[in-house]
Amino acid sequence: MKNVAVLAYDDCLVSAVSGVLEIFSIANTLTSESSAKDLFAGLKIVSPDGKNISGYVGIPLQVCGSIMDIRPDILVIPPVFGPIDVLLENEPFIARIAELEGQGTILASACAGSFLVARAGLLDGKPATTHWKLAPDFSARFAEVDLQPRRMLIDGGGYICAGGAMAWQDLALHIVARFMGREVAADCAKILVMDSTRDVQTPYFMFDNKTEESSFTDKEIGRVQEWMQENYHLPASTRIFAEKAGLGERTFLRRFKKATGMTPNNYLQQLRIEAARHLLEVSSKGVEEITARVGYDNPSSFRRLFKSMTGLSPREYRTRFSRME
């Protein structure tokens, strides 16, 4: 029997709080029908101080107590859709998370929930994941953590991290599989019509290529970024980029990396793959035509690059994300 508590706090994703408990309850029902004992017990919602909370979009949640007063076997930490600094600066609360881990509680976080586990110092030197869009902020705050944002879920034994906001579903099914068996988890997924096979977040990445002049931290580099965003399909080289910036090649490379966090080649690849993803979603164009439209010559090489960056082949991506009727 595993006692489970879900931590709730202001601006948390209410569907994650209730959804996790519902998946565990369904798993209990399935094992009961097969004459097995329930493995998830004491399912409850708690908050940092025992007070009821207001979830995302103002939905109220009634809790049964404070995390300070219980020691669950599993503590689920859901996504938060609001400023997280208030939680991170609540030292007694963060200390309690660290204390629970020391007492054997498994900490299972989704999305921004991993920030709380990291703030407690429990992920230093360990692999972890979070929502792909939060990765830069996470890395800036917790440089000692081996962040792997491409991965959907990481099980470190005493902790489990899931990536995206809706990855609480992957998290719940993984916990069911770990403690009740893969067959029960598969049955839960079938009953709820859920995809239980997601391994990576890469198909959901969106490249943030802002074009507003005010968004560029380096004006010379910004000019090149704007040119690349409009002409990503054209042949390009470091020499061409440096000339457009009015800089020497070595200076350009250094300043581009500082301004964008990536090399010019990586930046151009992201632009091209983002354009290809869009064409796969909204058009019926073949891979060969898309390859040429986004600036590549070899469809086979493009397919390999696309899969390495998204986790899916172009055909698989179109099947999953096409917006064509």
Image (tube, grey):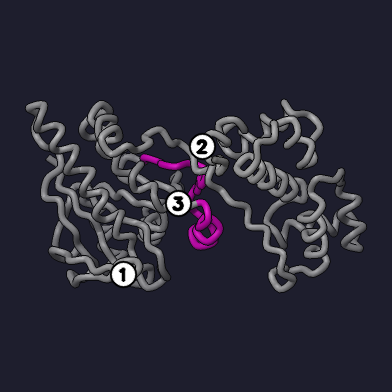
Q: Which residue is mark 1?
A: 10
Q: Quadrant of the C terminus?
A: top right
**Pointer 1 local density, CA inside 10 Å: few below 14, some 14–19, many at least 20:** many
* Residue 130 numbered mark, or none: 3
Q: Gap in Å between the C-alphas at discs 2 and 3?
A: 22 Å
240 to the left or right of 323: right
Nearer-the-camera pick, 193 or 130: 193
Callout 1: SS: loop
Question: Which residue is farthest front?
Answer: 325
Q: Nearer the viewer, mark 3 or mark 1?
A: 1
Q: Which residues make up the magenta segment?
A: 132-155
For the point 90% across and 51% down, the residue is 240
Mark 2 vs 3: CB contact within 8 A? no
48 to the left or right of 13: left
For residue 135, above or below residue 188: below
Q: Earlier in the sequence, mark 3 or mark 1?
A: 1
Q: Quadrant of the N terminus?
A: top left
Callout 2: SS: helix
Quadrant of the rendered structure where residue 287 is?
top right
For the point 63% across and 52% down, the residue is 207
Coordinates of residue 155 in the picture (x, y in percent): 36, 40
Callout 3: SS: loop
Coordinates of residue 112 in the picture (x, y in percent): 41, 58
Q: Amino acid at mark 3?
A: Thr
Q: Is residue 137 magenta?
A: yes
Q: Which residue is mark 2?
A: 320
For the point 14% across and 38% down, the residue is 28
Q: Is residue 135 magenta?
A: yes
Coordinates of residue 200 in the picture (x, y in percent): 49, 39
